Amino acid sequence: MMINRLFFTKTLSCKCYPFIFLLLFIFSFSGLAQGKYCVDEIKELNLRYLPGKVLTYYSTGQEKRANELKSLLERAAKLFEDSLKVEVDLVLAALDAKTWSGLMDRPYGLPTMRSGACKRGAGSFPEPRYAAIMPGAVDGPIYTSWIELKDSLSASTIQKLKETGIGFEQGGKVLIDFVALHELGHAYAHKFGLNFYVQFFAEFIADYLAYAFLRSTDERLDKKVIAVLTANVEGIIPVHSSFNKYENFRSSEHPPTETWYNSVITLKAAEIYDQRGFEFLYAVQKVFTEKEGQLKTDTIIARLDKIHPGILIWSEKISESLRKPK
């Protein structure tokens, strides 16, 4: 930063230079720390878009899928806003692989929610602005991992999928749609006042909300999703099965493991939701008041167990001794 020499000299002579230096430091630091929001980065791509409650941008050729995702998320958003008494402005981006690679810092096809920059660590932000990034087609690692499960599933599991009205290949789309709802759940959970703390807690709450919507639908979309998630638990061998290890795990390391964790978590969340509905989330909100980064997984599970007994025993069953690494 260039400083006028005359101004600087007069400042020194008036003995107020400590104050001026402080101002210069604050302005310089704030300029460096402030990043660009992901929602703004998406808008700058000059993609076509669909207006509405969920403003949806999409890559060329992805309009049909973008419309499907937009409709699904808007239906869920209405339930969340009515039940949690909060509102979220969401931007959805349904992208092709090329556009994705230029925008994100994670492999194509691994959906995510961003409240700051598209790439993690790119600046700090005074408030969250939510952007859900989804593949613009039914493809990517989540879909591929599902297709690879077919030969490892029992005949009874395949039959259960058919009984819910979906063929095996359709299960991949059902799974990706579920992940889209899960990402929306992150935004509403955060707006509701629940900090993410650790991965287990963040995923548990987002899965809870995703299931809440599915269970509320007249067409009972939850039945299809539960059949798919049950198949994941049967067929996937995760690299580990410890919620403490999950704390530092990233989905890009082994996407099937991420799918497995979210599957076992959602099956438990579904059990709790069927008993307690949204009341459970209000109970969680009441006792989880610490700031981000102040709680660890063991503490969180123990506290959740006090809200809903049985969570601790369930978490212990999802242990390293039950699942051998690859």
Image (cartoon, grey):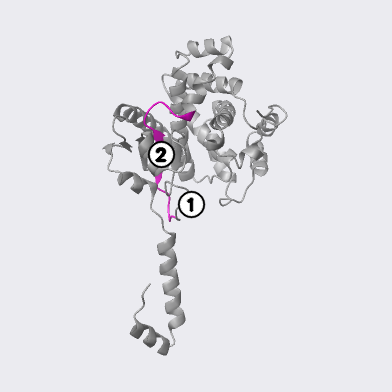
Q: Amino acid at mark 1?
A: Gly
Where residue 132 is drawn, which disc sits there?
2
Mark 2 surroundings within 10 Å by alpha-carbon count, few (fewer than 14), some (14 through 19), many (20 or more): many
Quarter of the image with the C terminus in it? top right
Q: Is residue 191 above or below residue 318?
A: below
- What residue is at 60 percent from the left and 45 percent from the top? 287
- Expressed as whole percent of the image width and height from the top left, the position of residue 254 reads 56, 33
Q: Amino acid at mark 2?
A: Ala
Q: Is residue 182 visible?
A: yes
Q: Which is nearer the eye, 24 or 227?
A: 24
- What residue is at 57 percent from the left and 10 percent from the top? 156
- Expressed as whole percent of the image width and height from the top left, the position of residue 273 reads 54, 29
Q: Please name which of the two marks, 1 or 2, marks the residue nearer to the observer.
A: 1
Task: Tell me where the magenta segment starts and ends, as one range.
Answer: 125-141
- What residue is at 54 percent from the left and 23 percent from the top? 229
Q: Which is nearer the eye, 104 or 203?
A: 104
Q: Is residue 114 left or right of residue 324?
A: left
What kind of element bears circle 2?
strand
- Expressed as whole percent of the image width and height from the top left, the position of residue 93 reads 36, 37
